[in-house]
Structures are given as structure tokens and as C-alpha cells.
Image (cartoon, rainbow, N blue to C red):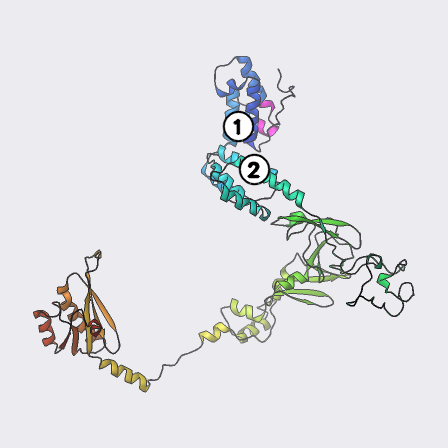
Amino acid sequence: MNPSTDTKFKVEPFDGSNYSLWSYKMKMYLMSKGLWEAVSGEAGSTAKEQQAHAAIVLNLNDLQLMHVVTSTTAKEAWDTLKKFHKTQDMANRLWLKEKFSAFKFTASSVGKHVTELEKLVMEMKNAGCEPTEEDVCATMLRSLPSSYEALVQAFRMSVSEFKLADLVSKLIAEEVRQKDSNRIEEATAFLAGKGNGKQQQKKKNARGMRKKGPFGKCFNCGKPGHYARDCRSEASPDEDVQDQSNVAFHATEAFASECWVMDSSASAHMCKTRDAFQEYSGVKTARTISSAKSSASAKILGDGTVVLRVWTGNLFSLTAATARGMTVTMDSEQCVVKRGGQVVATGRKQGKLMFLNIEGGDECHAAEDNMDLWHRRLGHASFGTLNSMIKDGKLKGALAEPGTVCGVCATAKQARKPFKSTREGLEARESARKDTTVCSDVLGPVTPASKSGYKYIVSFIMMKSRFVTIYPLRKKSEVCEAFKKFLKEAETSAGIKVKVLRSDNGGEYCNVGMVALCDEKTSSRCLTTRNRTAWQSG
């Protein structure tokens, strides 16, 4: 049977994209015809070898056909295509892993989203870095929009073992449930509030009495007793009284779709081009926006990002801009948007509308070329030098103006004078020199010992200043050497000569070495009762 004429099982010609899916379909096709033995290298007849070779070649487009022109067998042609398209190098594996970790929900439905993820997993499998089923489920749950948050949390808490098939079935069921429960809420962009008098009931006051009607005549029919907006007569030719009010935006002139109109009444930014958005998320409840001029309506497809197909252009909401802390300044010719004193957007007037400058951002950057900016660029140069450079034409675009006080320069140029010696300071230093009584005690043994073998700690505390010095000890007998070191440091660094050593009557203090040291340094000893008057030892 000629594979090219067999239309019952048709495989699309391979064009170089999605080799994994094509190779799987082609393998199933060859197995259905009993020709896979020729490709797998097993023994087969010459007729089957030729049929398998022809089936592979005839299911390639012209670009891919160039790779297998020199092949003579079906196995050689199959291996050549596999070598070209099924790469397992490190760069390809890293790229696929990064794509898998950053996978997001960009499809229009859950089914398409699952298909995209399974396609990516198949590519990773062919590259030799197939993720586990648990990793695939975790990526699927992470990539879902916020409307599926309840399902995601419930699935994580209730399932001990992740199965992709169970997760997909729950997601599809949740998608169907959300579509069925969505309620269409019509929100007109121009009309809200009072409408036609035919649709309103007569109002009563708090006592149940009917309120008195308006005084004067109607500006539409000329009859007294009602307003023009509630008039039941036909509207005047120069008026268009509709059952709509509360205009959210009013752009009446046609303009190009890539232009942005700066509207002070629009409650949000509106864009009709889907490709203009970098991030897009669907809305849970379907809503529509109606146009008062063209009587057309459009659905809001994104939550926070809107796609409209009935407006003649895009709207830049000045209300939303000011809500984010921006300042808007408008005059008869232009509009300037600033954030923190820096120009971020400008607009120009054309006809009766103000258009946002989306190209040629040099105007915004030129507005930033003030004295303060050039002062910082040139290493905090003086403003006199900057004015001279502007006059000489060395700073083009900068405006000569009096600069403000630079906080960095003011801080850097401050000089702190030395503090004057006060009577209190002199008395404090003199009192420190008279601090001649030292209390000492030993703590230990401490378990476990340190890596250096230290088990004890001896402390020396100055009674007046409460200055503390401690030394680690391996044995209690080292207290004498520690006290000798303390005396040397106190006399060298502070000029203090210890006259009294207060300690308990333990063996580490009442020994021949300690008595000789105190006699040598003319230090008297004050012994306390051991384990009873520890507070006297500091």
C-alpha cells in the first residue's frame, strides 16, 4: 500500500516543530502498518524496508527532506532526524528547566493550558531531564490564576499523593462550574443614577406624603411640573435625552488605535489591543461596558487589564494616575504627568482631545535636565560653575536657574569642632583613677569544656566604674597569673593602681603565690565568707 495514498491514518508532514509529537504519531502509524521492524533495526523483508523508508520521507516537508536525502534505509533516515531535533545537550536541558520553572497560565482555557504543559514535559523527557509527576502537579498548581486559589489549597491539603490525571479532572470541573456560576453584570461607562421618568416611581417623603413637583417649566416641552430629563415628550433635535447619566469618559473624535487619549473622567485605563499587555489575567465575573455614543457594548475580559473592541482607541485615566500619587498639570496646549517632581509622561492637544505622547520620550528626559540633576552628574559641582557652562553652551538643554540646597554637599562640608573639657568630665576621670578596689571570683567548672580545654572563668570587677575583665582558665591554680595580667593592663592602659583585692577565702586566692603577688604590688586583701557572701565578691 502506498503511504501517500492512505488517508485513513494521516500524519501531518513534519515541518521542524514539535518533533516529539510527530515522532510518536509516526511510530504509531508505522506500527499500524507493520513497518516499525525496519526502523527499529530488527530483521525484515526488503519490501517492508522500502515501504517504511518511503513513509518517513513522504511525511516530511521540503526543508526537513534535505536532512535525509542521502539516507538509504528507514533506520538511517529516522536516526538522522532524531539527531537533528532530539538534542540532549546541557544548554537545551537548562533552557527547558528554566521554561518549566517559569511556566504561567497564558491560554484561554484550562484544557489548552494542560496541553501546553504536557507538551513541555514531553520535550523535557526527550532531552533527558523529565520531571517527576509531583513536580508537574506542583507547576500546574503554581501557574493557575487567582480564581482557582480555593481549589489549589483544597487539593494540597487533601491529597497525599499527587496524580496529574486527578488534578486535570478537578481543574476542568472547576472551570465548568465557574462558567456556569458567572453572572453578567452590566456596567455602563456613561450612565448611572437618575433615568427616564417612566422608569421611576413617585417618591414620598418620610411622612408618606407625596413630594411637591419642581417649579418652573420643562426646557424640552415647555410644560410645568417636571424637569427636561423626566420629560415624556420627544427630545428636541439639538438634544439627546437618554436613560443614561454619570459619564465615565467622553471621547467623541475618531483616532488611531495606537493612540492614547488622556481622559480626566475615565475611572480606569482602557486598551483595545490584547497584544499591548505584558501580563493578563481573566475575570471571575463577566461584565460589560456600554458606549453612550455608538450604543455598542464590550465584555471586560481581564481583571485589571481590559480588552475593548468597540472603542475607537485607548484611554489613559488621569484619575487612576493621580490615585497612584502622580501630579497632572494641564493647559490649553499640553499636559504633563509627574511623579515625585519627575516628568514621566506628556500629552499634546489635537482638536478637542489630549493625546499621550507614547513615542519620542526625549521631551520627558529634556524636562529632567535641571540644575540639580547636572549638579549631581558632575560630581556636585558648584551652581556658579554650572551657570557659566550653560552660558558658554557646554550644557545643552539645561536651564540656568538658581539651584536648591544640596543635602549631600551641606553634610559633607560640615566641620565638627572638638568638645571642650568640662568640669564633670575631669571629675569623672579623676574618680576613675581613684577606683582602687577590685572584686574577684571564679566560675566553674563549666561542662562541657571548650575546645582549648578551658573549664573555669575568673572575673575582676572595678567597684566604682563596674568595669569587668574576665579570663578563661584551665585550672583554678591559674588565678594568680590572671591577676598579675589584670594588674599590668589596669596600670598600663588607665594608670590605675589596685590597692584592695576582695575575694572569698578559697584555695585559689589563699595560697603562697597570691600572697606574694599582693605583697609585691602593695595590694591588701579583703576576704569574705565563701558561698555565703557572694555579692561582696562582685
Is 356 part of what is drawn in magenta? no
Q: Magenta span covers which residues?
A: 56-65
What's the residue type where badge 1 is placed? Answer: Leu
Is 470 drawn above or below residue 526 in the view shown? above
Front residue of 429 and 261 = 429
Q: Residue at x 58, y 29 (%)?
A: 64
Q: Is residue 363 visible?
A: no
* Picture quadrant where residue 166 is located: top right
Quadrant of the image for the C terminus?
bottom left
Judging by the rendered image, the residue that carries numbered circle 1 is 81
Quadrant of the image for the N terminus?
top right
Q: Residue at x 50, y 32 (%)?
A: 86
Label 2 packing within 10 angstroms: few (<14), some (14-19), many (20+): some
Is 185 drawn above or below residue 351 in the view shown? above
Residue 509: % across, % down: 13, 70
Q: Is residue 203 visible?
A: yes
Residue 105: % across, % down: 58, 44
Judging by the rendered image, the residue that carries numbered circle 2 is 168
Front residue of 67 and 504 = 504
Q: Residue at x 45, y 76 (%)?
A: 413
Q: Secondary structure at mark 1?
A: helix
